[in-house]
Image (cartoon, rainbow, N blue to C red):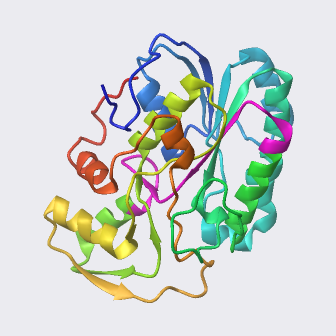
Amino acid sequence: MESRGGATKEANSITKKLMIIGAGGQVGLEFVRLLKGSSHQVFSYTREDLDITDYEKVSNLLNHVRPDVIVNCAAFTSVDEAEREQDRAFQINAHATKWLAEETRRINASLVFLSTNYVFNGEADLPYSEDDREDPINAYGRSKLAGEEFVRQTLNNYFIIRTSWVYGWSGQNYFLNFLDATETKETIGVVDVQISSPTYTEDLVHIVMKLVETDQFGTYHVTNRGSCSRYEFAKAILDIGAISSKLEKIAPDYQMASRPAYSVLKHKRLNQAGMTPRHWKEALVACMTVESEDHDGEF
């Protein structure tokens, strides 16, 4: 049987003690929601509960909980703000990650680190493999790549999860912002110079949890299949939702951080692990036909 994230439903009997850090963000919220009622023992902490840069508190909490798996969803995620606050972006995405990796090794646990397609420069014309050379073009991408490198240097038991254009009903994301815009605007301007893969949070979390249950450690690209521009994604939202707003292609704001023009990720290692994500259009239909606060997931 296939899960909604595309991973086979097996190893349901495996029970792990999981610590979710950054549980107030959109991916962290989805981990908490989907793990509810699972066989796993879950300890979740929002930014208000646990500042990942408070190393003493992080260390004390890890000593107390002694998790099998730490899922680090805490991140500085604003691409534009990262250009203006590079020290802060690196403090959270890189240096705090290094400390967390060292603490993970100390307690003999494994670590899930969420990374990004922005570790690539966007100059390719074919999807990026996990083995391709990284070359980020903005501070956010550089800070995330530094976090990846610290994890790889420190641990053997890690999952580095690169994903892209994450959306869903939780937190802040392009999908929700776009739906909000349709409430007040007849015509919505959309930049049409970037191509990547929209990734539904529910699918992302399902697949990550299947990887965690396999202990097949390494770096993985986890997105929905297929690719599109922001404009095509926005048009699909309008079509699926039967929304009457119109779209207008606009030029990017060049005062914002640079984005890779093409950042589609290839699922080489995920396929080797026997997992195939569903297409982004199928995932978007599923997302838009569920209630945002009343749908259940299971493993």
Q: Quadrant of residue 89?
A: bottom right
Q: In which quarter of the image is residue 191?
A: bottom left
Question: Which residue occupies the foreground of this view, 196 or 189?
Answer: 196
Query: Quadrant of the image for the C terminus?
Result: top left
| Residue 53 shows in the view | no
Where is residue 273 drawn, in percent x and y?
A: 52, 35
Q: Looking at the picture, does residue 298 appear above or below residue 169?
A: above
- The region drawn magenta spans 151-174
Residue visible at 25% across and 77% down in the picture: 185
Q: Looking at the picture, does residue 242 appear above or below residue 109?
A: below
Q: Is residue 207 magenta?
A: no
Q: Residue furthest front?
A: 272
Where is residue 54 drawn, in percent x and y?
A: 81, 39
Q: Does the magenta stretch include residue 162?
A: yes
Query: Quadrant of the image for the N terminus?
Result: top left
Where is residue 119 drawn, in percent x and y?
A: 66, 63
Q: Quadrant of residue 86?
A: bottom right
Q: Looking at the picture, does residue 123 appear above or below residue 21?
A: below
Question: Which residue occupies the foreground of this view, 123 or 39?
Answer: 123
